[in-house]
Amino acid sequence: MFKYKSISLIIIFFGIFTILNHSNAQPPKEPVSIPLIGDVAPAFKAKTTHGDIKFPEDYWNKWVVFFSHPADFTPVCTSELMAFANLADKFEQLNCKLLGLSVDGVNSHISWIKDIKDIKYKEEQNININYPLISDINLEISRKYGMIQKNSSDTRTIRAVFIIDPNHIVRALMYYPEKTGRNVNEILRTLTALQVSDSYSVATPADWQPGDDVIIPPKSNRDEAMKFYNNKDGDYYCPSWFLCLKKLPLDKAMKP
């Protein structure tokens, strides 16, 4: 009898241990949903420093660079807002609207923008942040765009960038850690490259800059590619049978 009681007690203690251990276990983290290249950019309504907006309704026939910040009044974010503002006219020339987001409120955004105007940085001063900053206190938009990543923070957005075309399709996305500022010139270069590729049915090589030669799309098979490669009268040149380039005169709208 004693033997059976001992076994029963062991089973009971094991059951209690299992329950307690399970109750202390951390629940699995929800996967982050991020719109990927080729996806339709999620729609949203938001309060901003420029009033209420609806996306995509308020951005018909426009490219959009949509970027997030971890929080207001943070040093890296401040430098980025100034960098975007300095290049705002060049984005505008490319039919592109800038749209920022932070989890803080509109009043906080406005106060931050006011303080930024008094900062002198890289010989720049009196900078106007003339693009809207979204207030996303409830994190609704941030979660739609995967800007909240659990391993980073549950309440602060990371440095995300989405380049969205006039058809509201995500064409490029970039993610940066909290302590690394974005290269705004690279974002502008990527936007320009996308527009050049769309307009002229070409590709852009590594380190491409506006005015550089572009890549002609490869042929469907080797025979066609070799024929193209051996044609010396074309307005292109081929370092190899699978790599051909040509000069592309860009109109003023395509030059940032």
Image (tube, rainbow, N blue to C red):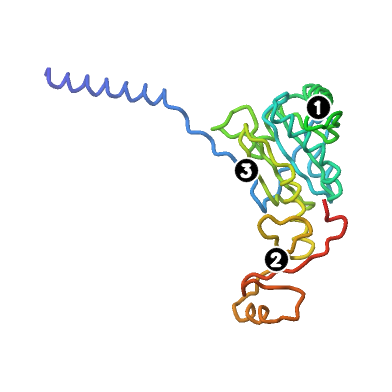
Q: Position of residue 121 (x, y in %)?
A: 78, 30
Q: Position of residue 256 (x, y in %)?
A: 82, 50
Q: Secondary structure at mark 2?
A: strand
Q: Residue at x 83, y 64 (%)?
A: 249
Could you say which quadrant of the image residue 53 lies in?
top right
Instruction: Tell me the amino acid under the disc marked 1.
Output: Lys
Q: Residues within 10 Å of mark 2 (few under 14, many from 20)?
A: many
Q: Nearer the viewer, residue 19 or 119?
A: 119
Q: Position of residue 225 (x, y in %)?
A: 64, 77
Q: Nearer the viewer, mark 1 or mark 3?
A: 1
Left or right, 12 with respect to 94, comes to: left
Location of mark 1 (residue): 120
Q: Residues within 10 Å of mark 1 (few under 14, many from 20)?
A: few
Q: Secondary structure at mark 3?
A: loop
Q: Position of residue 62 (x, y in %)?
A: 83, 49
Q: Which of disc 2 and disc 1 is earlier in sequence?
A: 1
Distance from label 1 to label 3 (Cα)?
A: 36 Å
Distance from label 2 to label 3 (Cα)?
A: 30 Å
Q: Nearer the viewer, mark 2 or mark 3?
A: 2
Q: Residue at x 79, y 44 (%)?
A: 56
Q: Secondary structure at mark 1?
A: loop
Instruction: Tell me the amino acid under the disc marked 3.
Output: Ile
Q: Nearer the viewer, residue 114 or 27?
A: 114
Location of mark 3 (residue): 34
Distance from label 1 to label 2 (Cα)?
A: 41 Å
Q: Which of disc 3 and disc 2 is earlier in sequence?
A: 3
Q: Residues within 10 Å of mark 3 (few under 14, many from 20)?
A: some
Instruction: Tell me the amino acid under the disc marked 2.
Output: Ile
Location of mark 2 (residue): 215
Q: Are marks 1 and 3 in contact (CB under 8 Å)?
A: no
